[in-house]
Image (tube, coloured by chain):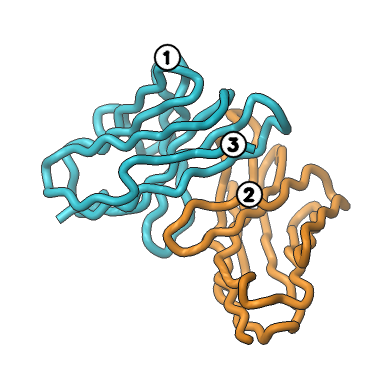
Chain colours: A orange, B cyan
Amino acid sequence: EDQVTQSPEALRLQEGESSSLNCSYTVSGLRGLFWYRQDPGKGPEFLFTLYSAGEEKEKERLKATLTKKESFLHITAPKPEDSATYLCAASRGGSQGNLIFGKGTKLSVKP
Amino acid sequence: SAVISQKPSRDICQRGTSLTIQCQVDSQVTMMFWYRQQPGQSLTLIATANQGSEATYESGFVIDKFPISRPNLTFSTLTVSNMSPEDSSIYLCSATPTLGPSYEQYFGPGTRLTVT
């Protein structure tokens, strides 16, 4: 069965304390691995798409990487405004709408 | 990217009634989708809204309960019919822009529905 699992469920960091979020996937015919940021009461905000193992993408303090089994979202020197829930999703073969989402990692960054 | 708006942003409805949620995109898009996000859960795809034809529903979701329209390339509606408290959730519209990588999806702000 295709699935996406994120860990940890919650992560509390001090400002400046770098860390990584994990997204493990078992998806047949993976077409893309997506990362979104979701703030309370808002829709998911698109961050990155990764298409093949070894690919890396960066945006400000965030860096996403992809292997054949998992993806990591590295957060370097986080700030309180990075606090949010980070969602991982996989696109599988077939309809472009077949995004499978993980439950997310809730990140809290304390000043 | 695409900017997506939804109406209403939230509503409280009585059991047995229906609610229609509107989704408007600021540019033409190829694909539009409707998701449900229950408290503490993942986003779950309800259906793909096809322009000019019937929506494509995922397993566990049926047209009689969640009728969907997409009359043009920038607008879609989702109706939640004969509601029960189990339908309380956030409903999200998403879209894939015509221009740009074909698998990127952008989301609206969501509609928070509470059924009493």
The CA distance from mark 3 to mark 1 is: 23 Å
The CA distance from mark 1 to mark 2 is: 28 Å
Q: Which of the two residues, B80 or B64, is positioned nearer the viewer here?
A: B80
Tell me which amino acid carries mark 3. Ala
Q: Image height check: is B60 above or below A66?
A: above
Tell me which amino acid carries mark 2. Phe
Residue labelled with disc 3: B2
Q: Are marks 2 and 3 in contact (CB under 8 Å)?
A: no
Residue labelled with disc 2: A46
For label 1, the SS is loop
Quick check: A52 left or right of A105?
A: right
Tell me which amino acid carries mark 1. Ser
Quick check: B89 left or right of A50?
A: left
Q: Position of residue B50 (x, y in %)?
A: 47, 21
User: Mark 3 falls within which chain?
Assistant: B
Position of the C terminus of chain A by quadrant:
bottom right
Q: Residue at x 59, y 36 (%)?
A: B2
Numbered circle sitting on residue B53 = 1
For label 2, the SS is strand
The CA distance from mark 2 to mark 3 is: 10 Å
